[in-house]
């Protein structure tokens, strides 16, 4: 075939595609497909097959009106349905009577010449061209290009289906869509553990609170934060200036009362009136002695020592030195570093149903490759304001593994709840937000 012939065929191909794009309805487009395609391809008969909700023969070459009840139409519909199942994934196929079942092949010579070419029009249907001579490889390639353009043109006339029709298409028995839908249903029903992340801290299990014994000002902190101390080690001192003066005054008053009592006792030996004065001085001496002893004991309480061995936990020395404290105000905590537990704050906005015995996993901030398993032992019934102004429920958990994290370590805790479907896990937060906004 010469270069001029190929140029003319290319021009005819472009003209046919242009005509197909300009078609105003399906009937006009079908006429172009089965009749005007002869300008490019030589054939004796052409039949257009339409896919969709109702699969049927859409157009025949040389016929303006179709009779679905005619024997030829019935036989042709059977041929299309059979060939579509054989070459479903291919764009073209040369077919003959040998490719059909016996009942259809027996009538091939009655209706068709020997050779036929099957062309798939995208997902919109198929075109069948028949003639006496065999189809060359060049003609097949040219026909495939033409069929691709026809398929695109047919897609413009697809009926707009509503959501019900689309749903029925997806649920059609045996269709690939239904299989995909069943797989999706199985995936969304897959059980998954409901979890929530919460801020957490490793805290002492049985801490000893070290409080201010009396009202005063902290004069000196003798330890560093998180320092290990022995029993009886000095921890902090309160300012003793005022109390020292009171003790000195009480001691002098006690000494003066003692001298007065001694003089009264000597006078009582020779004078009966001195016995009354001696009794008064004895009462006064006892009073001053009690006052002096009390002030002395209060002076000793200004020096706070460790009641047991452990680690002292507090913020910073500079935060406490020079600070005025009230009686019983907490200054620091004495804890056993081997006896720790986990405190977590579960945000109220993301709270799940947890109870004692639920599992918790701690991921420390300082050790990203380590984790510690724990078991909840207490859950606060009321949410409280925490750092950042958020409301959270406090959870207490004990570590179940042999290794325990360091006291005071911060991290993130993953709190485990019940098993729920995957779709609930994915939509839990959006549904909660929608419920709060809509007021369900």
Image: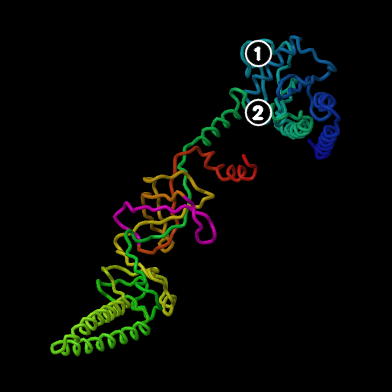
Q: Which residue is pictured at 77% across the width and 31% down the height?
A: 150
Mark 2, secondary structure of its residue: helix
Q: In this view, does 221 lie to the left or right of 282?
A: right
Looking at the image, which residue is at 25% across and 86% down?
257
**In the rendered image, which residue does mark 2 sit on?**
167
Q: In which quarter of the image is residue 341?
A: bottom left
What SS does tag 1 mark? Answer: helix
Category of crowding for the residue at label 2, using alpha-carbon neighbours closer than 10 angstroms: few (below 14), some (14–19), many (at least 20): few
Where residue 255 appears, as percent x and y from the top left, is: 24, 88
Query: Residue 104 falls in which quadrant of the image?
Result: top right
Which residue is at the far front? 272
Estimate the x, y position of residue 126 in percent, counting from the top left: 72, 26
Q: Earlier in the sequence, mark 1 or mark 2?
A: 1
Would residue 296 be found to the left or right of residue 42 on screen?
left
The magenta segment: 382-405
Q: Pointers 1 and 2 in contact (CB under 8 A)?
A: no
The residue at the point 42 percent across, 56 percent down is 363
Q: In this view, does 251 lie above or below 372?
A: below
Between marks 1 and 2 in the image, the one whose residue lies nearer the viewer:
2
Question: How far across and how far down the image is residue 370, in percent?
Answer: 38, 58
| Quadrant where the C terminus is found in the figure | top right
Q: Based on the picture, tell me whether residue 42 belongs to the magenta stretch.
A: no
Horizontal and vertical percent position of residue 371: 38, 55
- The residue labelled by disc 1 is 105
């Amino acid at each position: 075939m010469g270069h001029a012939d190929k140029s003319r065929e290319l021009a005819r191909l472009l003209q046919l595609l242009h005509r197909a794009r300009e078609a105003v309805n399906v009937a006009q487009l079908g006429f172009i497909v089965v009749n005007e395609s002869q300008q490019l391809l030589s054939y004796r008969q052409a039949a257009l097959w339409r896919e969709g909700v109702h699969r049927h023969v859409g157009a025949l070459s040389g016929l303006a009106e179709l009779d679905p009840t005619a024997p030829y139409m019935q036989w042709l519909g059977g041929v299309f349905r059979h060939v579509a199942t054989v070459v479903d994934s291919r764009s073209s196929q040369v077919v003959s009577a040998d490719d059909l079942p016996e009942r259809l092949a027996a009538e091939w010579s009655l209706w068709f010449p020997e050779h036929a070419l099957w062309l798939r029009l995208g997902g919109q249907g198929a075109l069948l061209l028949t003639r006496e001579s065999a189809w060359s490889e060049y003609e097949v390639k040219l026909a495939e290009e033409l069929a691709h353009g026809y398929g695109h043109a047919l897609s413009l006339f697809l009926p707009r289906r509503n959501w019900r029709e689309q749903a029925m298409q997806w649920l059609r028995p045996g269709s690939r869509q239904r299989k995909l839908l069943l797989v999706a249903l199985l995936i969304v029903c897959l059980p998954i553990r409901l979890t929530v992340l919460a801020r957490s801290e490793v805290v002492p299990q049985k801490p000893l609170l070290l409080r201010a014994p009396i009202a005063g000002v902290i004069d000196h902190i003798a330890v560093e934060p998180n320092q290990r101390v022995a029993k009886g080690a000095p921890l902090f001192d309160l300012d003793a200036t005022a109390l020292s003066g009171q003790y000195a005054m009480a001691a002098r008053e006690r000494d003066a009362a003692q001298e007065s009592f001694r003089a009264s006792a000597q006078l009582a030996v020779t004078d009966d009136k001195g016995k009354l004065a001696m009794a008064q001085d004895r009462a006064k001496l006892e009073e001053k002695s009690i006052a002096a002893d009390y002030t002395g004991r209060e002076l000793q309480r200004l020096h706070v020592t460790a009641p047991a061995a452990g680690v002292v936990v507090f913020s910073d020395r500079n935060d406490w030195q020079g600070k005025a404290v009230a009686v019983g105000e907490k200054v620091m905590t004495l804890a056993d570093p081997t006896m720790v537990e986990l405190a977590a704050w579960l945000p109220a906005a993301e709270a799940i149903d947890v109870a004692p015995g639920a599992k918790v996993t701690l991921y420390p901030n300082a050790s990203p490759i380590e984790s510690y398993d724990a078991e909840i032992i207490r859950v606060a019934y009321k949410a409280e304001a925490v750092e950042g102004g958020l409301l959270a429920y406090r959870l207490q958990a004990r570590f179940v593994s042999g290794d325990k994290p360091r006291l005071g370590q911060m991290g993130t805790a993953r709190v485990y709840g019940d098993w729920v479907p995957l779709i609930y896990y994915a939509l839990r937060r959006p549904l909660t937000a929608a419920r709060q906004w809509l007021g369900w």
